[in-house]
Amino acid sequence: MLHSPKRINSSARWSFLIGGKFMFLGVLLGAFGAHGLKKIVEASLLETWETGARYLLLHALALLILGLITQLTELSLKWPRFLIATGTFLFSFNCFFYVLSGVKTFAMIVPIGGTLLLIGWGIFLWQIFFFTRQELPKLN
């Protein structure tokens, strides 16, 4: 089948594209860290690389799931998706840049990414809790 009978909405498509790109890069960079960097960098830096790859893969999967929620429901989840994507980029890629360059500035940006991730997930929980509750019928 060349065409889906149902079009993907633009919000979900954005999440699928970013999530897919992050997933691709997470696998690529994770493999590079496991095989290419193993003999080049010290163990503590390799752990930093692995942490960046793990967060990239986990949040890539999360963005794919958030895109699916956006496609199948009326929730846009705009801010959670944006903050999680931005936080993931800042967290993971600054881990990678730090390991490759040794420049401490990159390491100092990582907590900003982590904070954006926390805010994004907090807003997600807020929206799921408050905007998906249905009023129960009153008993007479």
Image (cartoon, rainbow, N blue to C red):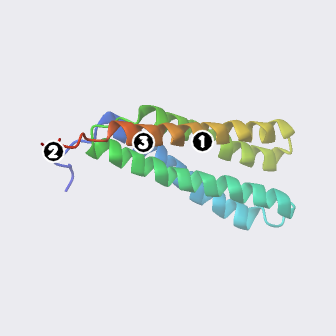
- Name the residue tied to disc 1: 118
Q: Give the alpha-carbon distance from disc 3 to disc 1, as whole Å.
A: 18 Å
Q: Is residue 9 left or right of residue 14?
A: left
| Element at label 1 | helix
- Residue at the extreme left: 140
Residue type beneath disc 1: Leu
Residue type beneath disc 3: Ser
- Residue at the extreme top: 79
Q: Disc 2 or disc 3, which is closer to the eye?
A: 2
Badge number at residue 139: 2
| Element at label 3 | helix
Q: Residue 114 location, x and y as percent?
A: 66, 42
Q: Is residue 91 left or right of residue 127?
A: right
Kindly indicate whether the residue at mark 3 contacts the one at mark 2 (C-beta within 8 angstroms).
no
Tell me if I can see residue 20 in this picture.
no
- Residue at the extreme front: 140
Report the residue at 54% width, 50% height from top.
Answer: 59
Q: Disc 1 or disc 2, which is closer to the eye?
A: 2
Q: Residue 67 location, x and y as percent?
A: 38, 45
- Quarter of the figure that contains the N terminus: bottom left
- Quarter of the figure that contains the C terminus: top left
Q: Residue 133 location, x and y as percent?
A: 31, 41
- 10 Å crowding of disc 3: few (<14), some (14-19), many (20+): many
Q: Quadrant of residue 105?
A: top right
Q: Quadrant of residue 41?
A: bottom right
- Name the residue tied to disc 3: 15
Tell me if I can see residue 104 in this picture.
yes
Examine the rendered structure and indicate whether residue 102 appears above or below residue 30: above
| Element at label 2 | loop
* Labels 3 and 1: the sequence-earlier one: 3
